[in-house]
């Protein structure tokens, strides 16, 4: 049986890592296609090296562009590759333009399609990722949900029960797989001269927060304010770097904030594990904060990962109120949410591999 995995962006390399291993363990052949959505060495190559991912057999070189152009380039390049490879399944991950292009290309060629992290919903169609999720799920023949909430979302959209599997979250698998090696190999805390539980970790890259210069300036102002109390470490996403001029970042760095290049997964895991509080608009980082039992503040109006808000591990801070960040960080710091395991037991990738290997009659 041949599986084609389509990845292109940093979070997808991380999600694919445990799944690739599980596919190998199940004796399934995997052909990796990299769309080229992320292409900087520290956003792509580094992850293939660290996570020992199956090397891409194809790199489509889609690069940066407007969403329509980028997705179009991928779709055009994917079609001949899928026609040549003739896989039994196409596997897509998460919610990026690579997910969308992969879904469309496979569905048009009537190749069975499986979506890992299906059913995540923000219910905000202004968010580009939400459109990718809705379309990918509609076209998929197997839908692997990370949480029961995601299962419910899919049911409410009329997707047949027999296509939906609660697998748990492959990002939890990744944290479990790589934390021990990260402990050994990363010296990021020493490098940045920060002490465990004595710094905040921040990431920011959602379009809603980066496209409006005033909003981005306010967010950096809030990070500067927090830094005066608790040093903030901010690995900067290329999109955010492109959107921010020196004026935007000045207050933050002047206050002593640590603005760094994007880091590898091992360094990221260690910063997450040892942070006193995490401030983010990332989907994956919200969950990783929880896996590491660190309180999280999410700079968004809403989240797909509502369980974490209900459990008290995550607090939403609408970006328009970013100036409340320092007070809120003080409130949540050191606090602990309720214990629960909404994202499975860390064996999601094995569930994915098992159902992919099952006879095709199980799917539509
Ligand atoms: N991440 C990383 N290095 C960084 C920032 C993030 O390895 O400098 C990892 C992070 O641990 C998580 C994933 O990238 O696993 C999240 O990706 P991102 O925030 O870009 O996307 P999202 O999860 O919002 O789709």
Image: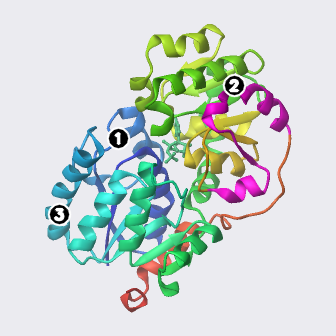
Q: Mark 3 vs mark 1: which is more N-terminal?
A: 1
Relative to 270, residue 362 above or below: below
The CA distance from mark 1 to mark 2 is: 32 Å
Residue 257 image position (x, y, % from top left): 63, 16
Classed neighbour count for the residue bearing mark 3: other residues with Cα under 10 Å, few (<14), some (14–19), many (≥20): some
Residue 253 image position (x, y, % from top left): 59, 12
Total numbered circles: 3
Q: Which residue is mark 3?
A: 79
Say if residue 237 shows up in the picture. no
Q: Nearer the viewer, residue 261 or 306?
A: 306
- Mark 3 close to ligand 1, CB under 8 Å: no
Q: Which residue is mark 2?
A: 323
Kind of element beneath mark 2? helix
The CA distance from mark 2 to mark 3 is: 47 Å
Q: Is residue 157 magenta?
A: no
> At x 82% / y 51%, what residue is drawn?
337
Classed neighbour count for the residue bearing mark 2: other residues with Cα under 10 Å, few (<14), some (14–19), many (≥20): some
Residue 22 image position (x, y, % from top left): 49, 67
Question: Which circle marks residue 305 in the picture?
Answer: none
Question: Which circle marks residue 38 in the picture?
Answer: 1
Q: Mark 1 vs mark 2: which is more N-terminal?
A: 1
Say if residue 63 shows up in the picture. yes
> At x 77% / y 29%, what residue is drawn?
196
Q: Which region shows up in magenta? A: 305-334
Residue 305 image position (x, y, % from top left): 63, 56
Horizontal arrangement in the rendering, residue 177 relative to residue 332 (left or right): left
Q: In the displayed image of the protein, which residue is found farthest to the top?
A: 254
Depth check, mark 2 against mark 3: the one in front is 2
> At x 29% / y 78%, what residue is drawn?
88
- Quadrant, the C terminus: bottom left
Q: In the displayed image of the protein, which residue is found farthest to the bottom?
A: 361
């Amino acid at each position: 049986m041949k599986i084609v995995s389509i990845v292109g962006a940093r979070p997808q390399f991380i999600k694919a890592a445990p799944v690739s291993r599980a596919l190998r363990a199940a004796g399934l052949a995997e052909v990796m296609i990299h769309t080229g959505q992320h292409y900087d060495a520290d956003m792509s190559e580094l992850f293939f090296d660290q996570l020992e991912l199956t090397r891409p057999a194809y790199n489509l070189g889609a690069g940066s562009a407007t969403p329509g152009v980028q997705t179009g380039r991928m779709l055009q390049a994917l079609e001949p590759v899928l026609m040549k490879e003739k896989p039994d399944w196409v596997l897509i991950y998460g919610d990026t333009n690579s997910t969308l292009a992969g879904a469309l290309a496979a569905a048009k060629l009537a190749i069975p399609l499986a979506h890992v992290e299906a059913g995540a919903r923000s219910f905000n169609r202004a968010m580009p990722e939400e459109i990718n999720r809705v379309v990918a799920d509609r076209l998929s023949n197997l839908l692997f949900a990370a949480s029961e909430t995601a299962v419910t979302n899919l049911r409410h959209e009329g997707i047949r029960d027999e296509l939906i599997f609660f697998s748990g979250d492959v990002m939890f698998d990744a944290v479990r797989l790589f934390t021990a090696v990260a402990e050994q190999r990363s010296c990021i805390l020493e490098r940045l001269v920060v002490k465990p539980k004595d710094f905040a970790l921040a990431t920011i890259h959602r379009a809603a927060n980066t496209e409006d210069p005033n909003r981005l300036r306010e967010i950096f102002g809030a990070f500067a304010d927090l830094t005066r109390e608790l040093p903030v470490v901010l690995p900067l996403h290329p999109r955010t770097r492109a959107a921010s001029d020196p004026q935007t970042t000045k207050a933050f760095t002047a206050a002593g904030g640590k603005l760094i290049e994007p880091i590898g997964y091992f360094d990221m895991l260690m910063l997450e594990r040892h942070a006193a509080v995490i401030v983010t608009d990332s989907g994956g980082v919200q969950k990783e904060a929880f896996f590491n039992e660190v309180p999280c503040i999410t700079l968004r109006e809403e989240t797909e990962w509502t369980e974490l808000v209900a459990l008290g591990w995550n607090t939403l801070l609408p970006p328009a109120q970013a100036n409340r960040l320092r007070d809120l960080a003080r409130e949540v710091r050191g606090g602990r949410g309720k214990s629960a395991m909404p994202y499975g037991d860390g064996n999601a990738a094995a569930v994915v591999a098992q159902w992919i290997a099952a006879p095709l009659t199980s799917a539509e």
